[in-house]
Image (tube, rainbow, N blue to C red):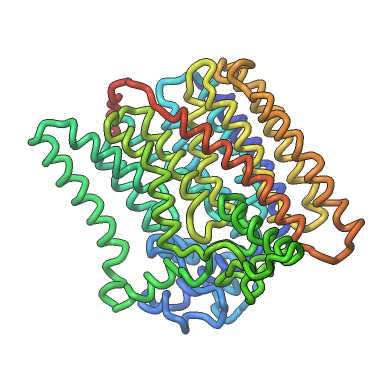
Amino acid sequence: MAENNGLIVGVYLISLVVKVLLIPTYRSTDFEVHRNWLAITHSKPYGEWYSDGASASEWTLDYPPLFAWFEWALSQCGALVDPGMVNVDNLGYESDATVVFQRLTVIISEAVLVFGALFAMHGTSISKKALAVFLVAAHPGLYIVDHIHFQYNGMLLGLLALSIYFATYGNDALATATFTTLLCMKHIYLYVAPAFGAYYLGLLWDLPLGQSVTLFITLAAVALSVLAVSFGPFIGKGMLPQIISRLFPIQRGLVHAYWAPNFWALYAALDKGLSIVLPRIGMERFVSGTKANLTGGLVGMSSFSVLPEVTSSTTFIITVCAMMPALIHIIRRPYPGTLVETVVYCSLCSFLFGYHVHEKAILMTLIPMAIMVAKARHGDRMAGLYMFLTTIGTYSLFPLLTEPQEYLIKVFLLLTYLIIAVPWLMREGVLSRTAGHSRLEKIYLMGIVPIELYCSFGHGMVFKDRWPFIPLMLISVYSAIGIVYAWGVMGMSYIGTGQHREKIKIK
């Protein structure tokens, strides 16, 4: 058994080596954001963590309280490594020790994701478990976002995986505790809360009345207990309104500075095109006097020149409507396979139609989908769709790395992943030629090459420094077309298996 497990360990260790090699690479402003949070939580009493005067930095704490406590725990170790990193006045502090420390915290905390993937693969072969570890731990999108750009998505996605499979295997209290903990660490996972809610609504409906009432009381008590532990101390300090305003800043506008490749990127591109074309054909009366500010590269309220403005409430209604087919299905059939598929589908709906979505949020779809595919049966169409979506989703993250020295790294990470993943999936029988890419998908994927050549090389050669947003817009719009297509296909094929719930005793 130990010899067989060597394949899993080997895959994980290789991914660790790659992550360690990425320590000196480019770091985004998110690196300083998290360093400042270390300083705030270490230097200030918890009642001041969310106050405007907690730090002179613009990067105020805007994650829920349990993540703040996570930063506090890291800061206790960080202070021993380099006291300068937890000094709230050291803005932009980046000593070598600080860089290595923060990078290692991401690498170490990502073990939660690997554990979650292995837990999900309970009862499968060693080869399939190793495949699951590879698909998540070596995912190029995770390399780019967490280990170069800098974030802690791996740990959080690990909690999501554990939540899904605790529920799938019948450990409902653990599932609720884990998912509520996740929400109290990063509220963006509200994107998939409807999937869990619908799953348990269907389960409660199916159970006898006595069992249903007992389960409901248990789940409610667990969820409320986690919320009380997370928010209670801050409510006592009168900080709840401030926390809420930090968590839900609707003043940031519909689209992010770099348009996430979703439906609103297509909407914004159409508006931009119409604002240029209509005046030239004598229809300038349809163009507002205010010039659209969607391509300025700044975070703030956006406006449209031709198309109607879109409010946060509008996006909420559209998102819920898009989710409804999957939610209705899982309420009617709360089977094991339906939960992970519904989580994947709901996360993609939120990504496509949500308000002020970041491009990095595509990982909430790709990573759970990777585990679902690794666990899938022979010739699963979802495997082909996963490879299609992970290619497009990862490519859409390329603009996060703007430095020339990172160009070959991001291309290498994506191509290497595809070269290893496709034959491995085929060897496991999960991906077959008949269940792979359609001709349309192949043509679309080949279109990435000319798009990338123009955006990375051609545009600069032709236009120099003019219209720098055009390459970003092209990548976003082209990626959005592929992701919208994948959403449509998934919406027709997310139906889960009709198996009974599998019980696993958790010790």
Residue pictured at 71% horizontal, 34% vertical: 445
Q: Is residue 340 above or below residue 428?
A: below
> What percent of the width, then of the height, locates residue 314?
43, 59
Residue pictured at 67% horizontal, 51% vertical: 476
Foreground of the two, 426 or 381: 381
Could one spot residue 82 in this view of the protein?
no
| Quarter of the image that includes the C terminus | top left
Residue pictured at 73% horizontal, 31% vertical: 443
- Residue at the outermost front position: 282
Relative horizontal placement of residue 170, taking residue 493 as reference (left or right): left
Q: Quadrant of residue 141?
A: top right
Residue pictured at 53% horizontal, 27% vertical: 382
Foreground of the two, 96 or 381: 381
Relative horizontal placement of residue 437, taking residue 78 as reference (left or right): right
Could one spot residue 174 in this view of the protein?
yes
Relative horizontal placement of residue 159, taking residue 450 as reference (left or right): left
- Residue at the outermost left position: 210
> What percent of the width, then of the height, locates residue 385?
57, 30
Q: Is residue 11 above or below residue 79?
A: above
